[in-house]
Amino acid sequence: MCGIFAYTGRKNAVPKVLEGLEKLEYRGYDSAGLALIDRKNRLKVIKTVGYVSQLSEEVFNRSRTLSGSIAIGHTRWATHGKVSKINAHPQVDCSKRVAVVHNGVIENFEELKKNLKNKGHRFISQTDTEVISHLIEEFLNEGYSFKTAFQKALGSLVGAWAVAVLSPLTPETLWLGRFSSPLAIGLTKEEIYVSSDSQAFPYNVKKVVFLEDGQLARLSLQNRKRVEIFNLKGKPVNYQLINKGLMEKVNLAKGEFPHFMLKEIFEQPLTVERGLRGRVDYSNKKVVLGGLRSVEEKLKEKEFIGLMACGTSLNAALVGRLFGVGALGLSVWSENSSDYSQLNLDKKILDRSAVFYISQSGETADTLSSLKLVQKETQALNLGIVNVVGSSLARRVEAGIYTRAGVEVGVAATKSFTNQLLALLLGLIYIGQLQGKQLVNQDKFFRELQLLPAIISKVLQEKEKIKATAGKLVEVKNFMFLGRHLAYPLALEGALKLKEISYRFSYGDSLGSLKHGPLAVISPENVVVAVIFSQEPELKKSISNIHEIVARQGRVVVISDLPMGEFPPAIEHFLPLSHLESLWLMPLVTSPVLQLLAYYLAVFLGREIDKPRYLAKSVTVI
């Protein structure tokens, strides 16, 4: 969940690395640092606690002594060791000849550290990363070349790692390694970039190489090959150059918005329109997905559709499961990839399943781990629903659907969630078509699907009412989000958004579960946010549940497409939804309301909206 950025080229590497780290700050913002080889072949390291902007200030104060053509940088999300300058990366060896930045977790670092201490190595940090620099140093002390020392050091590691190494012993070379954590190489005619996320590369990067598990790399402009990729035994590995022109450019401008999260919420009419473009034949009521065309015959044969995800993506999967079963008559199952292992791997089902792995970044460690397990143990058809072109997930599945949400900078998922919902609906309809299943009330569905961007725009016009409601809830410490059937996953997502950025306790559950425990915590001190759709199967029970909460002096915020008069007069706040004839599209018009409620509450509480504490955008560490 940390961010790595490195550069070697004809220009000063320091501003290049700082610019890259700013784009990667969504991956971690506890501390930041960089190392470079200066003009006199000296290793210089500078680190700070806090944001990359604070590192930039420190660099500016020392700008006369910080100049060189090769550098590595890091923005940290702490795993081992508290947030401190000592624990920030880069980490160096005893002789200060080896600087390392690392993303991942070294599971056997304590054993390695103990052995190295016994050999006289002195450790100064609490990090697992520091063992890497000392391992390289130890193998160098034993007489190995730098390349062999690097191979042996990384071959000693157990866990997940993406590593970039710099040393004055090889002053014109960047050394890289990757296992279960992403790392990409970007190339221009006179420059080489390295990043945890290819989206952070500047626009002039035309070609990208993605390292795969167990691959190491030596990068140097002075080398005729420039890029050498080899395995842990030192044997050369063939690699593929990907055209960066196929990948979306990063726009880091907030424009008129105070935060990226608000900007991204208001981009949803555009991103939904983009997610629909070219994929729906409205006149014939058909879905056309080029990304799944190559596996059409296999999809016709699969009896089950699996949805594997975690966090926000899992909430989207829960909506998808209900849609697939209820609207199409497909057999759909879902699993939390954060808790997936041999214990819940059902080979008989998986062999007969097409499984969608859902991840915004395409680098989610939990989801990639479940994909690896299923690929190894079963005959499942593995597919992806992902936002980032060229990501690890996109490269490892057989086919898939890009969500087309565009770059999302805010840590809390907003437009990516809504576009995941859309991609799931389209993907399941497409599979239904292949298997001869007809969508329930498909005329209404396709008519409103075409109008969906405009309908979401209308929902966003209620922002002032949502803001006013949030302002009246600032003193509330505990929230309970409740919904039934299709509204239940939305309740889970609403609770997740609120806790992520406001730091208030929020809990999501089914309205049907009210009498099975949650009713006990109803009180004037807590607030219930109820999501209720007019066409849900047991509407009368949902309204009855609201009466039960109010009768116990519960404070209630209702979000619904029903008229306010359908609810008890004692409800505290009412946020209207646009009414749709197709129930299955209601989640897509509801998610912006929940996102805005969480956003404005966090603003009133003075939270760090785009960088909530302890969280990072891309979860690359399990």
Image (cartoon, helix red, strand yellow):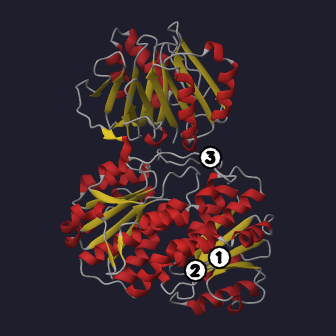
* 92 with respect to 598 (left or right): left
Distance between the alpha carbons at the discs numbered 3 and 2 = 31 Å
Tag of residue 614: 3
- In the rendered structure, which amino acid carries the disc numbered 1? Pro
Above or below, 448 relative to 237: below
Query: Which of the two labelled residues, at mark 3 and mark 1, occupies the earlier sequence position?
Result: 1
Residue at image location 62% in from the left, 55% down from the top: 261
* 186 with respect to 35 (left or right): left
* Contact (Cβ within 8 Å) of mark 3 with mark 2: no
* Contact (Cβ within 8 Å) of mark 2 with mark 1: yes
**Residue carrying label 2:** 513
**Residue carrying label 1:** 518
Q: Residue furthest top?
A: 40
Viewer can see residue 82: no
- In the rendered structure, which amino acid carries the disc numbered 3? Tyr
- Looking at the rendered structure, the secondary structure element under dot 3 is loop
Above or below, 512 relative to 375: below
Viewer can see residue 616: yes
Q: Quadrant of residue 500?
A: bottom right
* 240 with respect to 141 (left or right): left
301 vs 447, nearest the viewer: 447
Query: Which of the two labelled residues, at mark 2 and mark 1, occupies the earlier sequence position?
Result: 2
Distance between the alpha carbons at the discs numbered 2 and 1 = 7 Å
Tag of residue 30: none
Q: Nearer the viewer, mark 3 or mark 2?
A: 3
Q: Position of residue 254 (x, y in %)?
A: 63, 50
